[in-house]
Image (spheres, grey):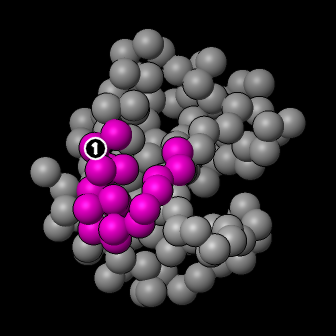
Amino acid sequence: MTYDSNNVFAKILRGEIPSVKVYEDAHVLSFMDVMPQVEGHTLVIPKEPAVDMLDLSPEGAAELIKATQRIAKAVKKALAPPGIMLMQLNGAAAGQSVFHIHFHILPRHAGIDMKLHAREMVDPKTLEPIAAKIRAALD
């Protein structure tokens, strides 16, 4: 599959679509998922255009995983879940719905089921207080 520079994450990177940002540096952007599966559902994307992990450069993959680990630690510190799920899907058959490589960081609590992926959008205003907690917990 060829990278589509008009995918929603590419538009977020260009500032064409707003997002509730958690973290940004020269290599990655992290923001709250507007269709969260659980409270605190955070996304991490590279700025490098790549469809999936198999399309991403080794340097881009290294930067992406370093940022994902850092932000996952902040999510754990900020929201105090007993578990953190990291999810990364490659290809439509694996469940990928936005074809720009990304990691999902999902705080997990026993007995709280996840909503279906990419089904129900929330008001971005409700995400800002959660994002603020995560930003404050970044080392």
Position of 135 with respect to 37 (left or right) is left
**Where is residue 109 drawn, in percent x and y?**
53, 68
Q: Residue 105: give x, y in percent of width and height.
A: 48, 53
The amino acid marked with disc number 1 is: Arg
Q: Residues within 10 Å of mark 1 (few under 14, many from 20)?
A: some
Q: Is residue 29 magenta?
A: no
Q: Residue at x 44, y 29 (%)?
A: 48
Q: Percent x, y for residue 24?
A: 27, 49
Q: Residue furthest left?
A: 139
Q: Quadrant of residue 19?
A: bottom left
**Mark 1 falls on what kind of element?**
helix
Front in this rendered view, residue 83 or 41: 83
Mostly what secondary structure, the magenta segment? Answer: helix
The answer to whether 61 is drawn above or below residue 44 in the figure is: above
Tell me the quarter of the picture where residue 118 sits: bottom right
Q: Magenta segment: does it hold 84?
A: yes
In-front residue for pair 74/57: 74
Judge whether 77 appears above or below 54 on screen.
Answer: below
The number of numbered discs placed on residues in the rendered structure image is 1
Question: Is the residue 128 above or below the residue 54 in the image?
Answer: below
Quarter placement of the N terminus: top right
Q: Residue 22's image quarter?
A: bottom left
Q: Is residue 56 visible?
A: yes
Q: Nearer the viewer, residue 56 or 85?
A: 85
Write the residue at 63% across / 29% down.
52
Image location (x, y in percent) of residue 13: 43, 49
Residue under the point 58% across and 68% down: 110
36 vs 126, left or right, is: right
Q: Which residue is mark 1?
A: 70
Residue at the (70%, 32%) spot, across then down: 90
**Start and end of the magenta stretch?**
69-86
Report if residue 32 is visible in the image: no
